[in-house]
Amino acid sequence: MNASALELAPAAGRVHGGIPAGVGASGERGFRGAMRGAAIAVALVLAGVLTFLVIKGGPAFFAGAGDLPAHATDFFSLAAPLAFGSAWVAVIALAFAALPAIGVALASTIYAPSPRFGRFLGAVLDLLAAVPSVVFGLWGLMVLAPAMVPLYEWLHGHLGWLPFFSGDPSVTGRTVLTAGLVVAVMILPIMAAMCRESFALTPPPLIEAAYALGATRWEMVRTAVLPVARSGIVAGGMLGLGRALGETMAVAMVLSATPGLISVNLISSENPPTIAAFIASAFPESTGSKVSALIGLGLVLFAISLVVSIVGRRFAKKGVAK
Amino acid sequence: MTLTLTRRETSADAATTLRASRPTWRRRSKNALATGAVVGAAVLTAVPLTLVIWAAIQRGSERLDLALFSNSMRGVVGQGGGLLHALTGTLLITAATAAIAIPLGVSAAIYLTEYGDQTRLASLTRRAVDIMVSIPSIVAGLAAYALFSLLLGPGTRSGLAGAVALAMIMIPVVVRASEEVLRLVPGDLREAGLALGSPRWRVIRKIVLPTALPGLTAGAVLGVARIIGETAPLLLVAGFTDAMNYNLAEGRMATLPVFIYTQWSSKGLDTAAYDQRAWAGALVLMAVVVALQLAARALPPQIAKLRRNR
């Protein structure tokens, strides 16, 4: 529909009959220029973000001991444990959020008893997505974390031989597992939205064919809905992963982090810090070269989430290819 | 397809045929299990939302008094004090962000849909928007900090810098929502306007934009809802203060999310008073966010009605 309107555009510019030519033409040129300028400006904002980050954060990549926060000797030794922590929290969050996200997406599309129920679930997800991360942080820290302590003690008692549950469990509950759970809640609506979109794209004839062959509803979902939506589900997962990697406040508040630590222990009081949370908690007290190091870390975080989102978008495109 | 079908009986007896085509017990129980899991996932999603809202109401209402909305934190140690300074800061910074992001975002979307749909600039802008969506909010804060320290010297903190950081997050949301809405405007309307001899910009202003207005408004409200709870970038570039600051261009400015964070992170001796204020702040912020979400859903039909009555 839009294409035909566009084809008309040049013709309309040339033959605008009754309108006084001068006024119309200059107005058109001005308006068009302004809109074009806005499109250029949006592209320039991104270029600006990159430029400012590189100018202010670039020197940090070559900084030595003394110029870096957390007593790091070089940039790599500062960034590596933080990158591990970010990835570890994000993977835990993804592991908890993936199945519920697919489930709730199925519930609001295929299984919904009525469109109203589907819309209701959609509203719940939208609201969940809108809860500010600082509120989730406060809740995770003061409500969820203390509630998790008995579970951590139980896990340590029964599964303590696993590296994930060895060592003394945290008495505050502010562990990487609690942080992962909170982030899981935060990325669930994003993943569910993506899954919903791809489930809704299932061709109805495929669904009807599966039912006609005598499939139960689950068999229909397994043979018709899920295979079609596979790349959409992966794209949703990548989107959630990207958001989890960049999540700052909830992690900064919930996680009791030990700088420089790399550990897969889920329930200890000593946890690996994440890039985003480290920046947020170290920034207000930093000056000079330490600020530059934090901006350099931001650049690393940007690069990681960019790669994740590019991979995710590739899957998303595959999903909607007609 | 790995579907296993029950063998159909060839008997003419209808009842036998029906029974035979009924899924086996095994398949039926698998189906029931899957249904249970899906229903369980739906219930599970509502649990954390309910718990968070419940906690905010229960703990936040302890300090939901008049002083909360009429006092700042200036000179307050321990009990008392309020979040007026933070609420003011949030309103000012959000308004400034919206003033940057909405005109820029909607204009860029107009270029993308009405003028340069297939041009190289359009694909460049779309790609930039795709990338900007994936920028973690704290990185937007760092970029704004870097920009303002290049312009005004290191260590600069102001409400305006906060608004610039938030605009980086809001612009892609507005561009995407507006582009989607503008594409929903029927091409016939544009063609009718053009056929009557109107120049393209008048068709856009008099026909396309009014038609898309409800959707554009909803997109803008969603964009505001997206940034109003942002904490990390504001913590970096707008900083924090206990006192009122009406000047966006100069000095640190408190905001509601940062208020919640700092009440928790830098407590005085009377920790209960700080926790109470943090939760009261969380309750106010949640109320604002929920109101915005409801507004984004409710606004379009109302605006459409207004226009029809006129």
Image (cartoon, coloured by chain):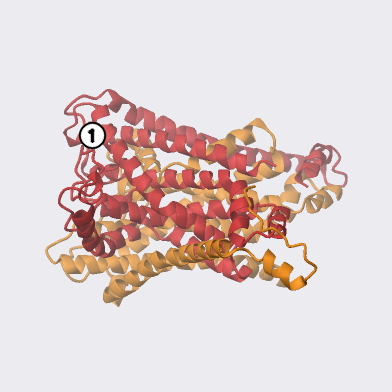
Chain colours: A red, B orange
**Residue at position x 62%, y 34% from top?**
B123
Q: Is residue B15 above or below residue A150?
A: below
Residue B141 lies, in percent from the top left, at: 37, 43
Residue B165 lies, in percent from the top left, at: 41, 45
Classify residue A297 as left or right of residue B128. left
Classify residue B280 as left or right of residue A125. left
Q: Is residue A306 visible?
A: yes
Task: Return the residue found at the far top.
Answer: A62
Q: Bin the neighbour count of mark 1 within 10 Å (Cα to Cα): few under 14, some 14-19, many 20 and up.
A: many
Classify residue B188 as left or right of residue A172. right
The residue wearing badge 1 is A290
Amino acid on which the number 1 mark rests in the picture: Lys
Q: Is residue B255 visible?
A: no
Front residue of A186 and A9: A186
**Residue at position x 21%, y 65% from top?**
B274
> Within the image, what quadrant is residue B285 found in?
bottom left
Task: Indicate the quadrant containing the C terminus of chain A: top left, top right, bottom left or bottom right.
Answer: top right
> Within the image, what quadrant is residue B302 found in?
bottom right
Q: Is residue A35 above or below residue B3?
A: above
Front residue of B217 and A308: A308
**Residue at position x 61%, y 39% from top?**
A318
